[in-house]
Image: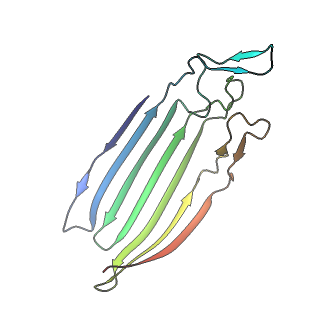
Amino acid sequence: GLEVLVKYVAYQSASSFIKTIRPFGNLAYSDFKYKDYRFQKSVLVIEDYSGKAVAGVAKFVGNLGIDITTKAGLYANMNYLYKDAMPISSDGLNKTTSYSLLNAKLGFQTVVSGHFDMDVFFGINNISGTQYVYMVFINQLPDAYLPAPYKANYFGGVNLKYNF
């Protein structure tokens, strides 16, 4: 396998409205295969999975995104995720599908007083309404995975932090 992460400060200023613009990306490549992996189903039947792709591991997983912060405390984050199809059984006959997700978050951070910081935010996960795999149970057919909701998921919150 191989993992790569790239982050870059594309813009930074202490005096302008936009404080920082930071694009980022990461990629994971996994080409894992079973080695000497056999399963005895009965006295006479032995399944040999050697050389097959390891169940539950996607070959490619990647993210691209951007973080933007402002002098006034506004911030934004947008993220694109891609996950390749993966086998969900050791024999490789059952697989998930590949999928892509688009997520975004917008917020406001400020210092309320000498001891309190506040963060107010709103976000959307799965903006494009993609049906994707949420949880995978390897070798547990017929109920091998749970699909996530195909509609966008909206969230928001307020964090109040006390600084000692």
Furthest residue in direction bottom, as rendered: 113
Give the residue at x 38% y 52%: 66
Furthest residue in direction front, as rendered: 43
The quarter of the picture where the C terminus appears is bottom left
Q: Is residue 57 above or below residue 131?
A: above
Q: Is residue 68 above or below residue 139?
A: below
Can residue 149 be seen at all in this image of the molecule?
Answer: yes
Give the residue at x 53% y 29%: 59
Q: Is 112 displayed left or right of 29 in the figure?
A: left
Residue 148: % across, % down: 67, 50
Q: Is residue 134 above or below residue 29?
A: below
Q: Is 23 displayed left or right of 51 in the figure?
A: left
Please count the marks in the image: 0
Quadrant of res 26: top left
Quadrant of res 1: top left
What scheme was used to colour the molecule? rainbow
Q: Nearer the viewer, residue 141 or 130?
A: 141
Q: Is 112 displayed left or right of 14 in the figure?
A: right
Residue 72: % across, % down: 31, 74
Q: Nearer the viewer, residue 78 or 5?
A: 5
Residue 89: % across, % down: 69, 29
Can residue 132 be seen at all in this image of the molecule?
Answer: no
Give the residue at x 48% y 29%: 30
Quadrant of res 73: bottom left
